[in-house]
Amino acid sequence: MLVRDAMSTVVLTIGPDHTLRQAAALMSARRVGAAIVYDPDAGGIGILTERDILDSVGRGQNPDDERTHAHTTNDVVFAAPTWTLQEAAEAMAHGGFRHLIVLERGEPAGIVSVRDIIRCWAPVRRQREEPVTA
């Protein structure tokens, strides 16, 4: 199975001047754990994750004052849609992160997460059927 089969194609993109509270609210509303941060002044495409927000709050920083650009990872490992899920999982394990931005022709095409990969690899959990009694 390939990354294109597992990735989320509806991606949240935010700017570098959003506050962490705004980013958290948008991520929560979309039920995603990461957002692409587009910042042409810092090299283009970065990623902000729920862990980045949690780390900031845990350090006592005010999420209404902190801007995403200060917490964005700009040294991003990108995946291609043609990577296998094994390649994506190995990149995540090697880098110690849970999300990969998927680029196609130099543009973000989606995000693949550890959860996406597990969903594809693990059998679907089925609800138990009621026992039939005679």
Image: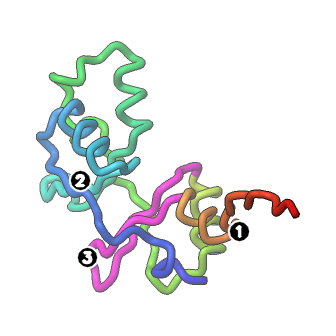
> Which residue in the protein does label 2 denote?
37
Residue type at tag 2: Val
Task: State if disc 2 and disc 1 touch (CB < 8 Å).
Answer: no
Rendered location of residue 42, percent (x, y): 20, 52
Question: Where is the C terminus found, in terms of image quarters?
Answer: bottom right
Task: State if disc 2 and disc 3 touch (CB < 8 Å).
Answer: no
Earlier along the polypeptide chain: callout 1 or callout 2? 2
Q: Indicate the secondary structure of the residue bearing disc 3.
A: strand
The dot on residue 31 is none
Rendered location of residue 69, percent (x, y): 21, 41
Q: Indicate the secondary structure of the residue bearing disc 2.
A: strand
> Which residue in the protein does label 3 denote?
107
Q: Main secondary structure of the magenta part?
A: strand
Front position in the image: 58 or 11: 11
> Which residue in the protein does label 1 denote?
123
Q: Is residue 13 above or below residue 80?
A: above
Q: Is residue 6 above or below residue 95?
A: below
Rendered location of residue 110, percent (x, y): 35, 70
Query: Colour scheme used in the picture?
Result: rainbow
Rendered location of residue 60, percent (x, y): 34, 13
**Is residue 108 on the magenta stretch?**
yes
Magenta range is 96-114
**Is residue 13 on the magenta stretch?**
no
Q: Which residue is at a point 35% across and 48% down the rendered structure image?
A: 31
Q: Which residue is at a point 38% across and 44% down the rendered structure image?
A: 49
Q: Which residue is at a point 38% across and 55% down the rendered structure image?
A: 75
**Mark 3 and mark 2: span between their CA atoms?**
13 Å
Q: Indicate the secondary structure of the residue bearing disc 1.
A: loop
Residue type at tag 1: Pro
